[in-house]
Amino acid sequence: MKIERLFTEMYRYYSGEPSRIQHLVKVHSFALQIGREEGLDQRTLEILEIAAIVHDIGIKKAFEKYGSYSGEYQELEGPPEAKAILEKMDYPKDIIERVCYLVGHHHSFYEIDGLDYQILIEADFLVNMHEGKMSEDSMLSVTREIFRTKTAKQICKLMFKMPE
């Protein structure tokens, strides 16, 4: 299947960087669960899965070019990298365009234009909250201000034993 091949491509891309591979696997898993539970149609779910796998692809180029892992630089450098891999794998143009849009905006939280975008941000936050050891106050703020789906709010509440 294409998704499995895409995982393998990203494992190659991040060869020797297990933390990056672990991150994309976790974001994909949360995104898939949230997308299914929130009732995404099959096409949107496919876009979400692809975007979750490649969402941080700009991080390597960002560091090479700017010496920074900043989200701003990831959003700038990610879409061309994602496009190259997805074209090589013969994904349809409309899917590539939407995935590249999501990759190019996944650190921008206030102009969300679709449920795939919302879920990608929530899945990434769920992983980053743990990996970045975010404070409880910061987690509460994120869940109040950014999270919109019932599923992601529930996962966050249960995973971190957050108050109602």
Image (cartoon, rainbow, N blue to C red):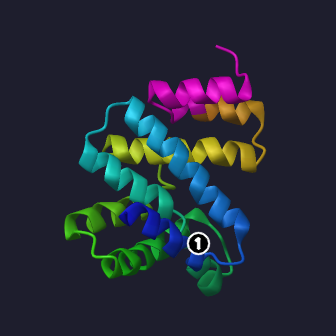
Q: Is residue 88 left or right of residue 17?
A: left
Q: Which residue is mark 1?
A: 11
Give the extent of the magenta segment: 143-164
User: Magenta region, mostly helix, strand or loop?
Assistant: helix
All told, the count of numbered labels is 1
The verdict on residue 119 being magenta is no
Q: Amino acid at mark 1?
A: Tyr
Q: Which one is nearer the viewer's eye here, 132 or 144?
A: 132
The residue most toward the top is 164
Residue drawn at 21 percent across, 64 percent down: 94
Report crowding for label 1: few under 14, some 14 to 19, many 20 or more residues within 10 A (C-alpha).
Answer: some
Above or below 33: residue 19: below
Q: Nearer the viewer, residue 11 or 114?
A: 11
State the residue at coordinates (59%, 44%).
Answer: 125
Q: Dividing the image into 4 quarters, which one contains the C terminus? A: top right
Residue depicted at 29% across the width and 60% down the height? 98
Closer to us: 101 or 96 = 96
Left or right of 83 on screen, residue 91: left
Label 1 element class? helix
x%, y% of residue 25? 58, 55
Image-quadrant location for residue 60: bottom right
Residue 110 appears in the rendering: no
- Measured as percent of width and height from the top left, residue 128 is found at 66, 48
Q: Position of residue 27 (x, y in %)?
A: 56, 50
Instruction: Classify 29 as above or below 22.
Output: above
The relative height of residue 145 versus residue 9 in the rendered view (above or below) is: above
Q: Which residue is pictured at 60% across the width and 86% down the height?
A: 65
Answer whether residue 39 is visible to the viewer in this image.
yes
Residue found at the far bottom of this picture: 65
In the image, 32: left or right of 63? left
Q: Quadrant of the N terminus?
A: bottom left
